[in-house]
Image: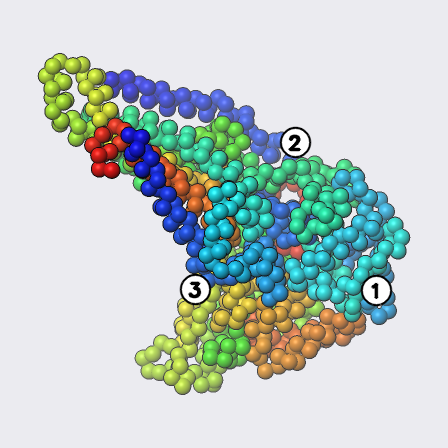
Amino acid sequence: MTRKIAVLLSALIVSIVLLAGCSGGNAAKTGAADAGKELVYATAKDINDMNPHLYPGSLPAQGMVYESLVENTEEGIKPLLAESWDVSEDGKVYTFHLRKDVKFHDGEPFNAEAVKKNIEAVQSNAGKHAWIKLSTKIVSVNVLDEHTFELVLSEPYYPALLELSMTRPYVFISPKDFVNGETKDGVSGHNGTGPYKLMEQKTDQYATFEANENYWGGAPKLNKITAKVLPAGETTFLALQKGEVNFIFTDDRGSDSIDVDAMNQLMDSGDFQLIRSKAMNTKMIVANSSKSDSPAHETAVREAIWYSIDRETISKQIFSGTETAANTLFSPNVNYANVELKQRGFDLDTAKQLLEKAGWKLGAGSEVRTKDGKPLAMKLYYDVSSSSQKTEAEFIQSTLKMVGVQLELFGEESSSIANRRATGDYDLLFNQTWGLAYDPQSTISAFTSESAYYHTTSGISKADELYKKIDEVMITMDEEKRKSLYADILTIVHDEAVFIPLTNGSVTIVAPTDLQGISFKQTQFELPFEQMYFE
Amino acid sequence: MISYIIKRSLLSIPLLVIISFLTFGLNHLSPLDPAEVILHAQGVPTITDELIAETKAALGMDRPFLIRYLHWLVSCLQLDFGNSYVTGKTVWSLLAPAFLNTLKLTLVSAAAIIALSIGLGVISARREGKMTDKSIRGVSFFLTSMPPYWLAALMVWYFSVQLDLLPTSGMDSYESYILPVIVITISYTGIYFRMIRSSMLSNMNEDYVLYGRASGLPEQKITLHILRNSLQVAISVFCMAIPIILGSTVVVENIFAWPGLGTLSVKSILSRDFPIIQAYVLVLAIAFVLFNTVSDIMNAAMNPKLRKGH
C-alpha cells in the first residue's frame, strides 16, 4: 500500500511539473515586449470608474481618453480642443473657438453644443467640485455657433484657463453616454475625444486602450496600451523581468511601485531605461499655527523645527537621491514661485538659540525643554501606508531630540489625516503640494479653506493680510500685480514657517530601452502616451 | 438523524444574527464620519459641510442605528449589500465575481491539500521513526515555516522568470492556477498531514488492529481500516479548512494579482469601503458557520454517540 501511494504521489508531482512545462511556455509568452510593441504598464489599483466628471477613476487612464479645451505646458496655456479664445475686457466672458475636425470615439461630433452639455453636467454636481474654484464662478455657457461658445463668469478669475486644462472635471465625454442628460449618477459609455479609446475593462485584472485612428492630432504610434493590475511591488518587479509588463511610472499618490534597488537591477539588465521628470511637488510637514495650547503655535518653535531637519540626508539616505532636498514651499520652477526667501539649512545651533530665546529652557539632566512647566512636546502624524514617511518621521524625531524637542509619532490612514487637517486636531502632519499644473494657485487657495490649510495658516499674526492678498491674487488681471502679490503671500508663509519643506518629488518612468518620445506633462498625474513610439 | 440536522441547523441562526449585528456595528467603531469616508473614498478633493450633509441624507445615515441595521439586514437577505462607497457599483456585483474567483482557487487547493496530507500522513505513520517519516516531517516543517509571500516570490522568480514556464500573475489560463495552488497547498499540507499522522498512530495501538493482525488480515486492509477511523477526526478539520483558506488568501492573491476576495478586502479596507468590508466579513462568517454545521452533521452521521447529546 505505502509503495503504491508513494508511486501515485510522485506521479502527481511529475505530472504537475510536466503540465507546467509543456503548456506554460506559449501562453505565458504574451510578454509585451514580443507582442507587436504594445505597452503594458503596471497599476496598483484598477482604473476604476472612467466617468471624467467624477473622481474615483485613474488619472493617467482618463488622460488618454478625454481631453480638455486647453493644455497647460511649460510655456503656458496652449490650445487643445479650443483653437483660440478671447477674454472680455472685464475678465468675465471667455469666448472659445473650437477645433472643427474633432469627433468623439463613437463618431458623435464635438461641437459647442456638446461642450455646453458637458460643462452643465459638471456644474449640476457642483458640491463635488468645490475644490476647483472655477466651478463656483461659472454663470452660464452660451452656444454662439456650431464651433463657438462663451463661458460667462460671475467675476474675473485669472486661473480659469488653468483649471480648464486639468484632467478633470472640465473634459468632454460624448453626450450619447449621458444618463438622463446627466453624468453625476454614472455614464453609459466612455467615449472621449482623446488619442486612445477604452476597449475593455476587466475589474481588478486589466484594461486595454487602442489607438484612436481618427484622432485629430494624428493617430498615435503605439497602437495598444494595457493597464495591468498588480497590487504587490515584488510581483511588478518579477513581471517586468519576465516581460509581462514593460512600463511603470509613479502613481498619483507619488509613490513608486518598485523600490530603488529593483529599478537599478532593471537598468543593469540593459533592457530598461529610467527617466525622471523635474521636480513636480513638495513634500512637507504642516504645522498647526492656530492651536494655542500647542508649541507649534509659536513661530520660533516652527523655525527651530525647520532648522533641525537634515534634508540632504533624507534625500540621500531615505530616497537614495531620487528626491531632492526642498528649501521652500514651492520649487523655483513653479509659476510665480521664483521669489527671494530666507535660507534655512540644517543648523542645530541656530535651532537651539531660537528656542532658548523664546523661553524654552533645558533643565539640568533633562532631555526635553520646558517653558512655564510645559514640556516642548508635539505630535506628528504620518500616512501609515507610506513607508518613506514613517522613516522620515523617525529620522526627524531623532534630530529634534538633539535640540530638546520631543516628537510623538502616529501613523494613520490618509483619510484620517485629512480629517485632522480639516478639524485642526494636530500639531504637525505630513502633506504635499498639489503639483506643478495646480500650483501655486490650488495650494494657495487651500490656505483659506476650512477643509485644507485654514488651521495651518489662521494662527499667524499676518493671517488677515494673507487672506486678503490671496483673494486679490485670484481675481487680479494685472500680471505684475499678481507677481508681487504671490511674492508677498509666499514670503509671509515662509517667514512664519508654517509649511516646513522636506523634499521635491518627481515622476519616475521605467520603460523599455527602445521606447522613444517619452516626456512628461505639467502634472504628476498623467503622461503623454500618444508621443511614445518604439524605435 | 434528521431531527439532529434540523436542530443543529436552527442553532446556527441566532449565531448568524449576532454576527450580522457585530458586522454592521463595525462601521460605528471607526472614529470617522462615514459620509466623510465616502467622499474621501470617491477622491473628492475638497470636502465641505454641505457636501457631508447631502451625502448623509442621500444614504439615509441620519436615521437611528437600529432602524438602519434592520434595513440593512433585510436587504442583505435579498443579497443586496448596498453600494460601494468608492465606485458606486453594487457590492454584490463586486463581491460575487471575487468570491467565485477565490472559491475556485480554494477548492482546487483544498483538493490538493486533502490528497497530499492523507497520502503523506499515511506514509509517515506507516514508517514511523524511519528515514521516510523523518524526511517528510523535516521537509514539511521547513516548507510550512517559510512565509507564503516569500515562497510565492521565490516560485515566481524560478518558474516564471528563470524557466519561463508559467505566468507571473493574473488569472488568464489554467496555468495561472499552478503557482498559487502550490503555495497555498504547501502552507497547509504541513499542518494537516501531521494531524492525519498522529491520528493514524494513535489508532495503530487500538485493539482492532491487533485483532486484525492476529487474524491474518493483509497489511493493506488494516491500513485502510486505520485510515477510515482516523479520517473521522480529520473530516471536521478538513471542513473547516475550506473557510479558513477562503479567508486567508490575502497574501497569495495580492502577490499573484488574483482578482479574488483577498485583493478586494485589502483594497476595501485601505479605502474604508465599509459596505464591501461588511459584506466580506458577513460572507466569511456565514461560510465558517455553514462549514462548521456541516462538519458537525457529518461527524454525527459517523458517530451516533454524538447525536444523543442533543
**Quadrant for the C terminus of chain A in the image:** top right
Q: Amino acid at mark 3?
A: Phe
Above or below: residue A340 compared with residue A524: below
Discs 2 and 3 lie in a common subunit: yes
Q: CA distance from mark 2 to mark 3?
A: 49 Å
| Disc nearer the start of the sequence (2/1) | 2
Q: Secondary structure at mark 3?
A: strand
Residue that label 1 marks: A93
Q: Tell me whether the residue at label 3 lies in contact with that at label 1, contact meaning CB atoms closer than 8 angstroms.
A: no
Q: Neighbour class for label 3 at 10 Å: few (<14), some, many (≥20)?
A: some
Res A254 quadrant in image = bottom right
Are tags 3 and 1 found on a single chain?
Answer: yes
Which image quadrant for residue B282? top left
Residue A241 placed where, x, y %?
A: 52, 38
Q: Nearer the viewer, residue B309 or B40?
A: B309
Residue furthest front as drawn = B3
Question: Callout 2, which amino acid?
Answer: Gly
Mark 2: secondary structure: loop
For the point 46% across and 75% down, the residue is: A348
* Residue drawn at x 13%, y 27% as measured from the top left: B205
